[in-house]
Amino acid sequence: MSTIQKPFLDPQKRVDLAVADLARRVKFSGLVTVIDGERFEGTTDGAGNPTIWYETEATTVARDYEWRSRTKPIQFDDIFRTRLPIKLNKHITQGVRTTPEQEAFDEVSYARDVLPPATTAVAKKLNAKIENSLGTTTNWKTTDLALGGGTAAQWAEEKLVEQLLEIQLRCDAQGMPQGGRKLLAGKNAYVKIAASKSLRAYDLTTATSVFKRGVRGYIEVADMELVNGVGLLGDDEFVVLHPSWAVMPTHRGEMPDPSFVTWAAAASVEGFAIRIQRGYDLNFDRNGQVIHTYWNIEEIKDEISRHTKASATSAADGSEAGDPIITDDNLVLTGKNVRIAKGAWTTPTA
């Protein structure tokens, strides 16, 4: 009598499906820079934690040279980089038991019936970590951005556009990277911006009725993508950020000893890295599946102290206004985060 062997979904295919499903469910991932720890050659901190060295942009200075008189020697400066060691010492796991019959699921059934509850749980946890990091940072360089205000009689659509342009220029002045900025707005600010007639790209007098009813989706204002921050921020709060304000590396962790598990596999996609391992429990006739990911979120506090016209003149070393200040061959940093700023919406008075 022959035995029919049921099909078995390859472990690598399972983890590939899982990491792709996880990446699409972490809805706040665009608010930080997600990097895969596998891309870097890391070290450990002595406790077995992978350490990712993250480098920000390099900078140096150029100086005037009195080439005819040669009264001063050429001054050599280093190429300075801010290097941040990020320890992946935070660990998220999700363990779930499945029946032996579920081991025979085909790819479609597995991706539909087994993975979603597990990946949704991990994604929810990661979303909460990003949200918490956004809400607890205290290293803002700018905290007084403003929208709204004045009286209802003074308010006009053009006033909102003017304020948004002022915010854009404030962020430019503090050194926030320009491409990819996001305006994360609480309820009151989001409604005013999203509903503003001045920010629509079509002519209301000639648009067809379907467009007059309003089209919502991707909205860009003053080179910032408008993001619905309801649930993340207070009703009157808003934040302007570049995703590089914080880095979230993930790492699958070390693969387990093959003799201790039924199988283990790892995969990464779009900066997310996970490991899935399975064991078998004879007491319950069940398979145990565990998803692992190591992570951390680190702020990029790399604002460079720069010369003013007065300080550049007094330095007498060829520095110009805007050049980085270098003391004893070291770059002087302020410890502030210039890649994020926050403000408040004020409802116009009656």
Image: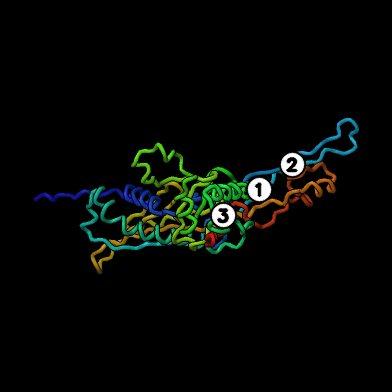
In the picture, measured across the screen, residue 150 lies left or right of residue 259, that is right
Q: Secondary structure at mark 3?
A: loop
Alpha-carbon distance for marks 1 and 2? 19 Å
Residue in the image at 79% along x and 46% along y: 309
Alpha-carbon distance for marks 3 and 2? 47 Å
Is disc 2 surrounded by few (<14), some (14 to 19) or many (20+) residues within 10 Å?
some
Which residue matches tag 3?
Answer: 154
Residue 2 in the image: state x and y as whole percent: 11, 49
Q: Nearer the viewer, residue 149 or 99?
A: 149
Residue farthest along the front direction in this orientation: 153
Sequence order check, earlier mark of 3 and 2: 2
Task: Give the number of the disc on residue 173.
Answer: 1
Which residue matches tag 2?
Answer: 61
Splitting the image into 4 quarters, where does residue 43 fall?
Answer: bottom right
Name which residue type carries label 2: Val
Name which residue type carries label 1: Ala
In the picture, measured across the screen, residue 325 lies left or right of residue 235, that is right
Residue in the image at 29% along x and 48% along y: 10
Depth-wise, is mark 1 or mark 3 nearer the camera? 3
Name which residue type carries label 3: Gln
